Image: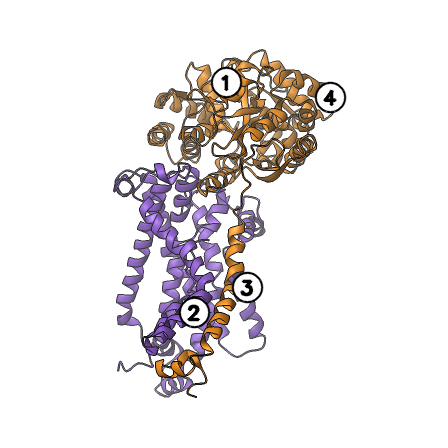
Amino acid sequence: MHPATPPTTDAPVGRAHRTPLPRRRLLRGLLAVTVAAPLMFGAAACGDDDGGAADPNAPVKLSIFWWGGDARAKLTEDALALYTKKHPNVTFEKTWQANQGYFDKLATLTAGGNPPDLFQIDDNYLAEYAARNTTLDLTSYQKSGKLDTSKFPESLWQYGVVDGKLAGLAAGENTQGLVYNKTLLTKNNLPEPTTGMSWEEHIAWAEQVTAKTKVPGTQDPSADYKAFWVWLRQQGKDLYKGSELGFTAEDVTKWFDLWKGARDRKATPTADVIHEGNSSDITKQLVVTGKSATSWVWANQMPDLKKNTKDELGVIAYPGDPSAQWARASMYWSVFKGSKNKDVAVDVINFLNNDQEAVKLLGTDRGLPSNQDLRRVVSDDTTDPAMKQSIAVEAELTQKFGKSPQVPIKGHSKVRSELIKAAENAQYGRATTAEAAAQFIEACKSAIA
Amino acid sequence: MALTTAPDPTRRGPGSDRAHAERRGPGRFRHSEGLAGYVFLSPWLIGLMGVTAIPMLLSLYLSFTNYDILTPFSEVEWVGLANYERMFTADPSYWHAVRVTLTFALIAVPLKLAAALGVALLLNRAWRGVGLFRGLFYLPSLLGGSVALAIVWVNMFNRDGAFNSLLSLFGITGKPWVNDPDWALETLMVLAIWQFGAPMVIFLAGLKQVPTELYEAASVDGAGRFRQFRNVTLPMLSPVIFFNLVLETINGFQGFTAAFVLSNGTGGPVDSTLMYTLNLYITGFTDLNMGYASAMAWVFLLAIAVITAIFFSTGRFWVHYSDGEDR
């Protein structure tokens, strides 16, 4: 047993084996390295990076990240392929996923030091990222004309300005849209809702729909920040004023009471169904699942909603004075501040917004094209009826739009989820409207502190 | 999820290696042996360091800062105990999450263990087809904390899900279980209990170990079925019960996937499924308060450690190791 296995021998025996030892050690070391190395470098290789791009023709691989469905992915990939065709040195590393979890992933990528060069973002998070200096200030590119916003509505690109910096460029324009089930109404000889109805009239209309069709007339939007926002603006208030809330507990109570009244009159579904519809998932919107005659969405979501139902849909503005709505940047393209390919990334944004072919490819998937000349071209060209509808409504509303509010502040995403929580507390009858409102205000204060 | 507790079989690695090295005594030779060992070990060691140990220590540091994910490490501010203070004094949703988690664990874990033991007792008999049933009962736990399973569960326990269709056969109008704040957590408990296969298999193995002569002796002494269970089976099984209890409690506290899927990552309806880990995730990744979330994680770790320690210290009063010299 004794010297046959060197690893367990003691020192004196080791001396006897002195000659073969170095070779043996070398072999053993080599073996260990060959086993270990691929595992290590395999992992390390995942994080590799392309260098800077001083030479305009040097190959550039630009990472780009967006949320959306298959349709958006197809359109975006086509548009990016067109860019590569025109600039063969630029290729793209494309990543996309559903909206749910998108911002978790984006934050994680940023924390990991591996954020995409170019990413899609919306007003719910723009201030969070801009305030932390994660986004590149695009102002100098805009001034030098490398980022052309001359054909944009002024208020649209301004809706990307946070603390005086252009943190993101509008990838499209949209506005709040109340989508209703046209087929259901026609079948039951019910009138279609119209833009300009007051909230009371809307609820009365919905009550009538419930009574006649047995389908609840309207989704209860009390948990929906964008509906609450429009309503606030109609009361002369706003969601935010500077770094403060633009409303009080009384306003929230009034808003919750409005909808409590609607629920009591059976104008809305029951709390559990309302809860289902409070999901941000398009496929769960009650107007397409048939659980309500309306849903409160963004106007550019019409084509996507249409894909999920056989019924015909209509879209109008939210109730009340439509001048409370504004030309909102449906989403933005932002460049990561530490990107090594900033100039290229900005050029891609410019291309996606101002190149006629690219804009035609993208259509109205991200909202109406920001470039108004091209917006006209696209609306003349489109054959998709749902897209036509949303363009028509937005074109009509554009005449009535009011001034844009400020971009929501840091902490806004928490404010949104707290509104859902408070509104549902009232909907399930676990709190009075006043209690729920007080709870919401309290939570908001700590969220934006 | 990431907070797995499965014992790592490789953990024995460095310890036993060191033991070898010591036995071998001093010298250059031992050195090279050790080196080769560590080089061979490096893939795992680097993994442990890089993926577990260093991030854990880093999170301890971060729990004393205002780290928000997006800000680079170099600009992170030290805030002392502020995060811990906030947790204990100024965050009602934190305590709500603690309550939800405790409720979940206190109800689901004992019921799951009872179900596992009950079925294990039934399947411990020798009858035709028992193997098939063992497999069938084990199956759900193979599906584990999978997302697909949670999605199925949500659809089964909807207002118009399969479960309510079943109830309607008996003329009962069901509730919108998963969308009802009074029932959503209970639905998750049922899901957890249903997956009793893993502790069941361990109980079965434990039951096989109980010497039959003990039962023979007991029945000679006139003990009935129940007395036999109480005075023979339970004491003999107590180490296995202890093992399952510790493991399942830790698992119960860490429930995340099902709650995340059921509530679309919000802990809803109205925070009724806001489990501790889900609250932690939302705080860190959605609200971007990673420093605060790290503090929550450390308090969680300590709490689990304390609970486990309590189990171990009370264990000597009721856990009976038959192979020991304790009698």
As drawn, the label of residue A201 is none
The type of residue carrying mark 4 is Asp
The type of residue carrying mark 2 is Gly
Which chain is drawn using orange? A
Chain letter for mark 4, please. A
* Separation (CA) of disc 3 from disc 4: 55 Å
The disc, 3 or 2, on the residue closer to the chain's N-terminal end is 2
Chain letter for mark 1, please. A
Residue occupied by mark 1: A158
The type of residue carrying mark 3 is Leu
Callout in the foreground (3, 4): 4
Residue occupied by mark 4: A381
Which chain is drawn using purple? B
To the question of a shared chain for discs 3 and 2, the answer is: yes
- The reply to whether callout 2 and callout 1 are in contact (CB within 8 Å) is no
Q: Residue furthest front?
A: A19
**Few, some or many residues within 10 Å of mark 4 (<14, 14–19, 20+):** few
To the question of a shared chain for discs 2 and 1, the answer is: no
The disc, 1 or 4, on the residue closer to the chain's N-terminal end is 1
Q: A38 or B167: which is nearer to us?
A: A38
Q: B200 or B260: which is nearer to us?
A: B260
To the question of a shared chain for discs 3 and 1, the answer is: no
Residue occupied by mark 3: B139
Chain letter for mark 2, please. B
Callout in the foreground (3, 2): 2
Please provide percent x and percent y for residue A215. Answer: 59, 31
Secondary-structure class at tag 2: helix
The type of residue carrying mark 1 is Gln
Q: In the shown orientation, is residue A87 left or right of residue A207? A: right
Q: Visible in this render: residue A319? A: no
Q: Visible in this render: residue A265? A: yes
**Few, some or many residues within 10 Å of mark 3 (<14, 14–19, 20+):** some
